[in-house]
Amino acid sequence: MQRLKVMILAAMAVFALGATMAASAYAGVEALNAEGKPTAATFKGVSTKKTNLSTLGSSLEVLCGQTTSEGSLEAGGKVGTFHLRFEKCDTSLGGECTGLGDTAGTILALGSLQLATNSGLTVGYLLFATEHLHFSCTVLGIAKLFLVEGQYLCEVKPINVLTKTLTVACKKGAEHGDPAVTSYENFKGEAATLTNPLSSSEGDTTATMAAEEGEGEATVTPEAKLDL
């Protein structure tokens, strides 16, 4: 009987060690190629679905009728950069919106991105960090200057399967300017929250929380798997 107890305890110890090793071996979310190795990748796409930028406490929205996206992931398959071209931009009150130095009705956005997931490892995210983005909108005949910057999370599908096409969906919460998601698990497998959430300010006013809402598809080269 004593021998049986020792065997059971040993089996339990092995199981616990295996679980610990599996947890420690988890490398966080990453893009893998057809050989199952972390990979560099590029993505490109054009969406004709409207993108909305809203600010907490304000009914005014910036609306863009078309978005061209380009970006890349570095060789480790976890971090990269993006370039977005928002076109046919105006506001919910009418009037054209244009980025400083950009073509009329166009706003260019640059920044960095990271792969992320939720705590249950069931949802894939792209964490965008937008650099200082200046643009002006003519609202009821008055030119208004806006500054937008910060981080926001967008859901990306499919996950855990090799694909040539990704669908990226950015969502807002119940209110204008309220991001749908602020907590996530980063590519290192660590629990995190947005440290610099997306914000918008008009002229010299204090920056206020903002949210982006839109959806589009992008072609991935080479095909890759968003591995959670």
Image: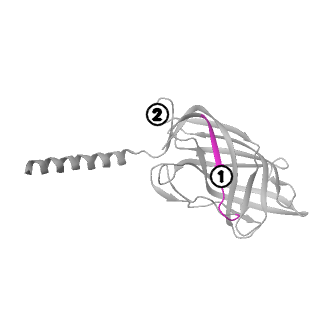
User: Which one is nearer the viewer's eye here, 147 or 86?
Assistant: 86
Q: In the orientation shown, which residue stands out farthest toward the front?
A: 1
Residue type for callout 1:
Cys
Query: Which amino acid is tagged 2?
Result: Lys
SS at mark 1 in the image: strand
The answer to whether residue 173 is magenta is: yes
Q: Which residue is depicted at the point 84% across and 50% down?
A: 105
Question: What label sits on residue 182 in the rendered view?
Answer: none
> From the viewer's perspective, is 50 left or right of 149?
right
Give the extent of the magenta segment.
164-176
Q: Is residue 83 magenta?
A: no
Which is in the foreground here, disc 1 or disc 2? 1
From the image, tell me which residue sits under label 2. Answer: 37
Q: Residue at x 47, y 52 (%)?
A: 120
Q: How is the image coloured?
A: one colour
Q: Nearer the viewer, residue 8 or 118?
A: 8
Q: Residue furthest left?
A: 2
Does the CB distance between marks 1 and 2 fall below 8 Å? no
List x then y, in percent, for residue 76: 49, 39
Vertical position of residue 164 compared to residue 56: above or below: above
Disc 1/disc 2 C-alpha distance (Å): 28 Å
Question: Label 1 belongs to which residue?
Answer: 170
Residue 153 on image: x %, y %: 60, 53
